Image (cartoon, rainbow, N blue to C red):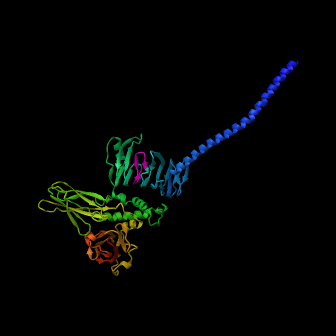
């Protein structure tokens, strides 16, 4: 009995010792494990938070920023749609909708600008590979103007039919058939895609001053392995469009105003007002174009450029053809109202084609801002001259900036006076009832009285009312001005001995219905180097 009690007591005390030992270990172990778990969780959440923060920073850094907006332009990101305001970020994968009567200007971190027209919808994606950022705007519909003056990022535009890869470029692109692309500076690679598979069908290099037009017919040809002609020199209608003029004005003047101003009825630079001015100008220009009917068997003629085409290359080749038995080709240029004749030294007798080079240079050039006119005459072995034919086209200097005044003044061929040409500039009292003539620009810059000329040549552009029969400057009738025209130009140049140091005064008048207008006094100051 005593032994049994002893054994039971010993087992009981052993169990008690184990319980006490277990409680002692738990007392120290559990707090340690708790501290360890708290530390581990804090590290995990810290890393996760850092990754989220880095992701947000990266997304914001690579976002496009809203620089100007009008209307209710919306962005959908992570299935959340918001209306956009100035300085809002456009994150990668955002879906942007620009409804009718709305527009938006976006800018990248490297300064590339995207001006998106109304009725546009696109998705923005950002990618970075091999130290080159790619800004991808995938359009479902709409039109965009791109001005990118950097090689730090690649621009990728496109739709279901076409991809455009480029950088350091100025262009305009309209998506969906017809796909329309015009390059004004730089170049781009255009890739035509299969609508069903997205695979490449063909690709083209599109250079500066070149356009690409992909319509339903040409796209169908590509699908059956045909090669339609879809590239061409950019048509003058592109340069005369208000979309082109507004965007180049915006580019050259770093405009900080909102797009709201475009849609205001009383805005001086309103789209509608500017468009009406351009349409009126185009109508007047069409009236002035006289279609020549020539006998190509006896008369030489130009094949390039086309009549009234807008040229922006500073060096061009005038191409043409001559009749059989031609020994020499004579080109007549009208650098002033006195024509200058030149025999082509490179022409080989009895060949059909001729080439004449024209280039822009303030000192020696024969290509000038504004309207340029050239005539061609074929001469046979006996010295007999053929009838002549002529070409007129427009050279627009790509280095010249465009201002609001220049846009409106150049395009406004009306009977109203320019605000800088007041009655104080008129030499005579207006007894004829005719308005003063208008001088709108000098070397593509807006004219103001006392204009300071920076070069040794002044290309002066002006206008007179419809119905004027002639224009007179300092008593000299302009021979290039024809009855019915409204636009005239005149050149002051040291080479023509009509530009002097100091103050140069031009008295300009016109005749209409037998009446002479009052004389406009134009003052141009010049200091030779």
Magenta segment, which residues?
A: 154-175
Residue 217 seen from this side? no
Residue 220 relative to residue 23: left or right: left
Residue 301 seen from this side? yes
Residue at 34% across, 62% down:
397
- The quadrant holding residue 336 is bottom left
Compare residues 285 and 243 and report the one nearer the observer. 243
Task: Name above or below for residue 429 compared with residue 134.
Answer: below
- Residue 373: percent from left, percent from top: 26, 64
Is 159 part of what is drawn in magenta? yes
Is 130 part of what is drawn in magenta? no
Give the main secondary structure of the magenta stretch: strand
Total residue callouts: 0
Residue 179 relative to residue 61: left or right: left
Residue at 42% across, 45% down:
160
- The quadrant holding residue 269 is bottom left
- Residue 17: percent from left, percent from top: 79, 28
Task: Name above or below for residue 28 compared with residue 456.
Answer: above
Task: Name above or below for residue 437 compared with residue 382.
Answer: below
**Quadrant location of the N terminus?**
top right
């Amino acid at each position: 009995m005593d032994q049994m009690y002893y054994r039971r007591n010993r087992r009981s005390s052993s169990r008690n010792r184990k319980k006490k030992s277990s409680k002692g270990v738990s007392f120290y172990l559990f707090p340690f494990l708790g501290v360890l778990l708290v530390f581990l969780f804090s590290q995990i959440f810290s890393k996760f938070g850092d990754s989220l923060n880095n992701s947000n920073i990266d997304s914001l850094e690579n976002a496009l920023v809203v620089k100007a907006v009008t209307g209710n332009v919306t962005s959908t990101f992570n299935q959340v749609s918001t209306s956009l305001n100035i300085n809002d970020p456009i994150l990668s994968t955002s879906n942007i909708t620009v409804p009718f009567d709305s527009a938006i200007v976006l800018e990248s971190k490297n300064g590339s600008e995207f001006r998106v027209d109304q009725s546009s919808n696109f998705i923005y994606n950002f990618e970075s590979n091999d130290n080159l950022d790619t800004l991808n705007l995938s359009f479902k519909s709409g039109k965009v103007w791109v001005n990118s003056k950097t090689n730090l990022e690649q621009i990728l535009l496109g739709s279901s039919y076409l991809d455009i890869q480029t950088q350091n470029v100025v262009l305009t692109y309209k998506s969906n058939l017809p796909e329309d692309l015009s390059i004004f500076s730089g170049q781009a690679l255009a890739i035509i895609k299969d609508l069903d598979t997205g695979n490449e069908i063909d690709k083209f290099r599109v250079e500066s001053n070149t356009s690409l037009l992909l319509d339903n017919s040409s796209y169908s040809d590509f699908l059956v392995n045909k090669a339609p002609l879809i590239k061409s020199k950019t048509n003058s209608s592109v340069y005369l469009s208000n979309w082109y003029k507004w965007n180049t004005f915006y580019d050259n003047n770093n405009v900080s105003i909102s797009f709201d101003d475009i849609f205001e009825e009383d805005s001086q630079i309103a789209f509608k007002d500017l468009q009406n001015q351009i349409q009126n100008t185009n109508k007047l220009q069409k009236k002035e174009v006289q279609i020549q009917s020539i006998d190509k068997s006896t008369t030489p003629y130009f094949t390039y450029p086309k009549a009234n085409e807008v040229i922006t290359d500073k060096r061009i080749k005038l191409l043409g053809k001559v009749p059989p038995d031609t020994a020499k080709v004579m080109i007549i240029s009208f650098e002033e109202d006195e024509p200058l004749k030149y025999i082509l030294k490179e022409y080989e007798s009895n060949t059909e084609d001729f080439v004449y080079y024209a280039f822009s240079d303030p000192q020696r050039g024969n290509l000038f801002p504004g309207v340029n006119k050239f005539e061609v005459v074929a001469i046979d072995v006996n010295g007999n001259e053929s009838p002549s034919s002529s070409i007129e086209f427009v050279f627009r200097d790509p280095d010249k900036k465009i201002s609001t005044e220049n846009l409106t003044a150049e395009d406004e061929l009306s009977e109203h006076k320019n605000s800088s040409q007041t009655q104080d500039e008129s030499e005579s009292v207006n007894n004829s009832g005719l308005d003063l003539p208008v001088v709108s620009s000098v070397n593509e810059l807006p004219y103001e009285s006392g204009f300071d000329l920076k070069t040794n040549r002044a290309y002066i552009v002006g206008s007179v009312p419809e119905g004027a029969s002639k224009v007179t400057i300092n008593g000299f009738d302009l021979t290039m001005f024809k009855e019915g025209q409204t636009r005239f130009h005149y050149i002051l140049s040291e080479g023509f001995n009509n530009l002097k140091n100091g103050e140069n005064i031009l008295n300009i008048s016109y005749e209409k219905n037998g009446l002479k207008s009052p004389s406009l006094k134009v003052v141009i100051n010049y200091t030779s180097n």
